[in-house]
């Protein structure tokens, strides 16, 4: 079991280094920074209000459900981060620089990615035609976190899984 874990850590670090070096152009960094900012918290406040604004009183239940889904996702994300305490890539690899300030100390899972996949799943369940574009956006937010040196690829995969699972559970309640 230890050999498998060591191989996974090696794969994760190698992929991280390849992605960081490949995305290191000025244009790549600007694009990654823009994408990561689209996954910052304040943009989700509008998402909470959208069902109410679009549907009035009939959207209030959906607004509360989405708010609860985000609250659950944030709690799980924080518990995992606090329990696992994985150092950020730039702390463990001299070749990796953090090109944005991370919002907290630990790396696993990626909160930006989990929130983006949660938002994509919730909106996509309501407007299915938007789901492919929203998933592409959520994946781009996750990739930006690796390119900017603040997450490992496995952090992003775990965040995508967390956000997707909470979104599917919440969408099943609508």
Image (cartoon, helix red, strand yellow):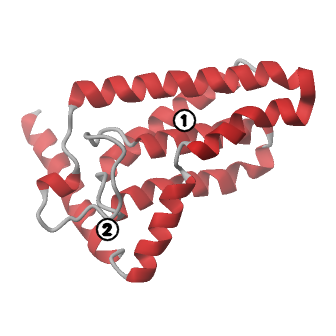
- Left or right of residue 14: residue 115: right
Residue 89, quarter of picture? bottom left
- Please tell me which of labels 2 and 1 falls first in the chain: 2
Q: State whether residue 160 appears in this view.
A: no
CA distance for labels 2 and 1: 24 Å
Query: 165 or 138, which lies in front?
Result: 138
SS at circle 2: helix
What residue sits right under mark 2 in the picture? Answer: 19
Question: x, y (%) of residue 7?
Answer: 14, 48
Residue 68 visible? The answer is yes
> Along the line of sight, which residue is nearer the eye, 160 or 100?
100
Left or right: where 70 falls relative to 148: right
Q: Residue at x 57, y 55 (%)?
A: 38
Q: Which secondary structure, mark 1?
A: helix
Q: Is residue 149 above or below residue 116?
A: below
Instruction: Locate the C terminus and report the quarter of the image it occupies.
Output: top right
Q: Position of residue 84 (x, y in %)?
A: 22, 29
Quadrant housing residue 58:
top right
Residue at the spot of label 1: 164
């Amino acid at each position: 079991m230890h050999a498998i874990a060591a191989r996974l850590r090696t794969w994760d670090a190698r992929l991280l280094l390849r992605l960081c070096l490949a995305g290191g152009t000025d244009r790549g960094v600007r694009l990654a920074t823009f994408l990561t900012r689209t996954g910052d918290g304040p943009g989700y406040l509008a998402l909470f209000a959208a069902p109410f604004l679009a549907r009035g009183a009939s959207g209030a239940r959906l607004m509360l459900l989405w708010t609860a889904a985000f609250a659950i996702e944030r709690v799980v994300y924080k518990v995992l981060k606090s329990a696992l305490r994985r150092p950020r890539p730039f702390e463990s690899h001299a070749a990796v620089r953090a090109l944005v300030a991370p919002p907290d100390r630990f790396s696993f899972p990626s909160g930006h990615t989990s929130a983006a996949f949660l938002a994509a799943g919730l909106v996509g369940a309501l407007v299915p035609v938007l789901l492919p574009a929203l998933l592409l956006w959520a994946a781009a937010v996750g990739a930006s976190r690796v390119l900017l040196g603040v997450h490992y690829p496995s952090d992003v995969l775990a965040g995508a899984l967390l956000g997707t699972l909470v979104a599917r559970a919440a969408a099943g309640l609508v």
